[in-house]
């Protein structure tokens, strides 16, 4: 299978961190967690450094239920990426769960979110064993679509699944409603803080300090049981044993305390370790190899240093059982980065990011490579990575981070790289910010004026047209006559007046326009025009974008009853989708073909299309196949019979139509992506069914039976 739309996800996002061999056991909290499994969700909400993840690892080790784990980060805020990661996590429990949903997520035109989630819930309900799904660090998500999706899942959650969420801040889901329904268990900072006995266990048994109870009580009081503060204090005391001096220094809020303690901790490390900590703090995840590349110091082994830091309990968290991947404690990493900024100039730090970007690219992690290229301020490199290998990153779950970078670039940089203008408009469209899409596309066209129309430029022109077709197909109601006028007026205002103080005016002009763009014949014509333009310019191997354009063209032409063009567009969708392994798009296009055949009273061919859609659908969720089932029932009940002893199949009809157009067997094979022997086989079956022996007789017989559809009906 050729995979065009997916992007590698680091497996460490799905590893449940291994409990430390020496840890403070917290039965008062693990008991609460176990007793609350009858509810739908457990929320552990507390600031950084309160041991949320550590507590979960302790509980999961003994709770008796299998668990799937997902560590979230900012780049997971896009709904497609979030759901892809969540399904990948669930597959650690059930290997094939969500395969059909993943195929839906990779289609050029994303189905409605409720359909996707319903399909996923249907598969979750089939899991017989009760299990837990952990969404760790949910505060990294800043996305209403993701929040809405999570609440939809909770609202319809099968009884065998329990959701656990750790976060530094409450999620934007209706917690009050969940509380009233007794579906929510909550652990807050007050619950998570170390008690006096837990502080004693940590400081004396785990950290080996042998402090008196009055000193422990003082530290516990001054830190308010804040585990990160106690941890740093313990490391500092280990260095000079002056507990009294350290305890007296605890004043002010947590961050002031941390600044002081990190300084204390760093001073007690060797120069090599300090350098290692600071330089590698730019990485969200660490392994020996990437640390070696960032450090470029043959005298320091990244793998050995990480293992040594873990042995010293120096704020590194192992992310897998093999001790290959680690991360720094989040607060510790934040403070190390702050120190790095203070100690080095920007060019040196940019070089570290460039080395990290090189490593990630060489190891197949394109989004991470792009992120570090952006941080290195290397526009050329970031632009190349964003364009992707045949498919831009913003079309593969990275629209949010792509848009953040594109918004930061001056117009002169975008003008020198027209592809970035195109991706800018496309990313705005994907994230639902329709207002600026057309302006970015026009800027791309202006930047392309005078350039040679090579393959790359033609592909950009095709992508511009495909983006316009998508924009035109989004809205379905309203008055189209005023829409284009308002949109053009808005774009003119944007170009003439610039950013300035006219933002509200521009929003007022464009927002109504974007909601009515496709309605009526003018809107459909716009979709048809732009989709045709896209297909005429896009290179043949730009399969995903061609598929999206062909799908929009097929739907629009079908609505206008331009059936020959719709049929050709749907056939491209089917061929491309099967090549990519995206059966949902193929099913939807096959249903469209069935509807066309049915509209032309070709009930036998319509039935074959619907049957093929059901066959291709296989394990796809039932809502996606309902239209095919209904269509099959309609034509089966019509009672209409073909004059043929055995009706032609849909593919045989296509071959016959091309024969009638005078195409050779070789040309038919190229047109339908069939081998020459396969075409010859179709010829034999067609001749047998029509009871003829040559092409001219087949064409005449087909005309007698009215087997050829009208190429175009009056508008």
Image (cartoon, helix red, strand yellow):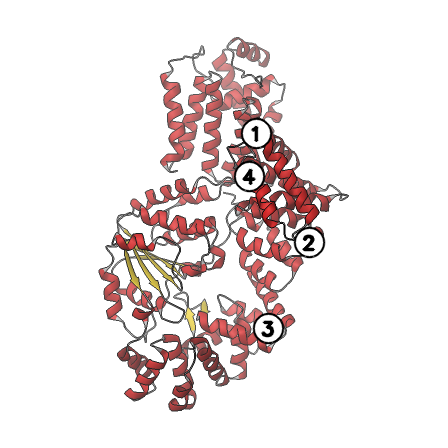
Label located before the other in sequence (4 or 2): 2
Q: Around disc 2, counting alpha carbons within 10 Å, would you say few (fewer than 14), some (14 to 19), or many (20 or more)? A: few
Residue 200 in percent (x, y) is at: 29, 82
Whether pointer 4 and pointer 3 mark residues with C-beta atoms closer than 8 Å, the reply is no
Question: What is the distance, in whole Å, between disc 3 and disc 1 at their CAs?
Answer: 58 Å
Whether pointer 4 and pointer 2 mark residues with C-beta atoms closer than 8 Å, the reply is no
The quadrant the C terminus occupies is: top right
Residue 564 in percent (x, y) is at: 57, 22
Q: Around disc 3, counting alpha carbons within 10 Å, would you say few (fewer than 14), some (14 to 19), or many (20 or more)? A: some
Instruction: Name the disc covering residue 524, or none.
Output: 1
Question: What is the distance, in whole Å, between disc 3 and disc 2 at their CAs?
Answer: 36 Å
Q: Around disc 1, counting alpha carbons within 10 Å, would you say few (fewer than 14), some (14 to 19), or many (20 or more)? A: many
**Above-or-below relation of 434 to 8:** above
Residue 410 in percent (x, y) is at: 67, 56
Closer to us: 612 or 372: 372
Whether pointer 3 and pointer 2 mark residues with C-beta atoms closer than 8 Å, the reply is no
Label located before the other in sequence (3 or 2): 3
| SS at circle 3 | loop
Closer to us: 299 or 193: 193
Write down the residue under mark 3: 296
Label located before the other in sequence (1 or 4): 4
| SS at circle 2 | helix
């Amino acid at each position: 299978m050729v995979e065009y739309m997916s992007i590698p996800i680091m497996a460490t996002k799905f590893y449940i961190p291994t409990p430390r061999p020496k840890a403070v056991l917290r039965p008062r909290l693990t008991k609460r967690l176990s007793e609350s499994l009858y509810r739908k969700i457990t929320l552990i909400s507390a600031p950084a450094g309160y041991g949320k993840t550590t507590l979960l690892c302790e509980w999961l080790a003994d709770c008796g239920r299998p668990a799937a784990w997902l560590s979230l980060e900012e780049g997971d805020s896009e709904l497609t990426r979030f759901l892809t990661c969540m399904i990948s996590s669930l597959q650690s429990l059930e290997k094939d769960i969500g395969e059909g949903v993943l195929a839906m997520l990779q289609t050029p035109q994303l189905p409605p979110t409720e359909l996707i989630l319903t399909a996923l819930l249907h598969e979750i309900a089939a899991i017989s064993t009760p299990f837990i799904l952990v969404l760790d660090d949910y505060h990294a998500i800043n996305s209403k679509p993701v929040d809405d999706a999570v609440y939809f899942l909770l609202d319809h959650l099968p009884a065998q699944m329990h959701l656990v969420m750790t976060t530094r801040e409450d999620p934007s889901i209706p917690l009050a409603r969940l509380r009233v329904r007794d579906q929510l268990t909550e652990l807050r900072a007050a619950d998570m803080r170390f008690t006096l006995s837990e502080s004693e266990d940590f400081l004396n048994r785990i950290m080996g300090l042998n402090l008196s109870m009055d000193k422990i009580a003082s530290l516990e009081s001054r830190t308010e049981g804040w585990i990160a503060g106690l941890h740093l204090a313990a490391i500092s005391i280990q260095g000079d044993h002056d507990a009294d001096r350290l305890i007296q220094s605890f004043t002010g809020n947590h961050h002031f305390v941390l600044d002081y303690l990190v300084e204390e901790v760093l001073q007690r490390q060797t120069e090599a370790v300090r350098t290692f900590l600071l330089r590698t703090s730019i990485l969200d995840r660490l392994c020996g190899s990437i640390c070696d590349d960032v450090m470029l110091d043959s005298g320091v082994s990244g793998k050995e240093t990480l293992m040594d830091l873990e042995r010293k309990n120096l704020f590194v968290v192992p992310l897998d059982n093999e001790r290959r991947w680690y991360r720094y404690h989040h607060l510790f990493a934040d403070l190390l980065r702050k120190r790095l900024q203070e100690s080095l100039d920007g060019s040196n730090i940019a070089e570290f990011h460039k080395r990290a970007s090189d490593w990630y690219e060489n190891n197949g992690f394109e989004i991470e490579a792009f992120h570090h290229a952006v941080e290195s301020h290397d526009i050329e490199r970031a632009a190349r990575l964003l364009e992707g290998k045949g498919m831009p990153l913003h079309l593969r779950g990275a629209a949010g981070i792509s848009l953040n970078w594109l918004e930061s670039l001056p117009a002169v940089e975008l003008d020198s790289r027209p592809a970035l203008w195109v991706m800018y408009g496309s990313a705005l469209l994907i994230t639902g910010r329709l207002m600026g899409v057309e302006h970015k596309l026009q800027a791309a066209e202006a930047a392309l004026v005078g350039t040679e129309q090579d393959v790359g430029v033609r592909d950009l022109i095709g992508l511009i047209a495909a983006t316009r077709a998508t924009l035109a197909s989004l809205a379905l109601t309203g008055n189209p006559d005023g829409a284009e006028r308002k949109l053009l007026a808005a774009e003119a205002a944007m170009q003439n007046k610039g950013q300035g103080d006219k933002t509200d005016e521009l929003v007022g002009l464009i927002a109504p326009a974007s909601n009515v763009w496709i309605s009526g014949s003018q809107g459909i014509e716009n979709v048809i025009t732009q989709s045709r333009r896209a297909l005429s310019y896009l290179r043949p191997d730009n399969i995903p974008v061609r598929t999206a354009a062909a799908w929009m063209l097929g739907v629009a032409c079908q609505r206008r009853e331009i059936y020959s063009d719709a049929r050709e567009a749907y056939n491209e969708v089917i061929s491309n989708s099967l090549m990519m392994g995206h059966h949902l798009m193929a099913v939807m296009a096959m249903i469209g073909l069935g509807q066309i055949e049915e509209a032309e009273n070709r009930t036998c061919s319509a039935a074959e299309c619907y049957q093929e859609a059901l066959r291709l659908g296989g394990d796809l969720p039932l809502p996606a196949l309902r239209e095919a089932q209904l269509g099959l029932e309609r034509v089966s009940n019509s009672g209409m019979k073909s004059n043929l002893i055995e009706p032609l199949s849909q593919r045989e009809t296509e071959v016959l139509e091309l024969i009638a157009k005078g195409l050779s067997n070789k040309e038919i094979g190229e047109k339908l992506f069939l081998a020459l022997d396969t075409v010859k086989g179709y010829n034999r079956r067609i001749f047998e069914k029509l009871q003829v022996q040559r092409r001219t007789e087949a064409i005449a017989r087909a005309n007698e039976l009215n087997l050829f559809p009208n190429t175009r009906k009056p508008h």
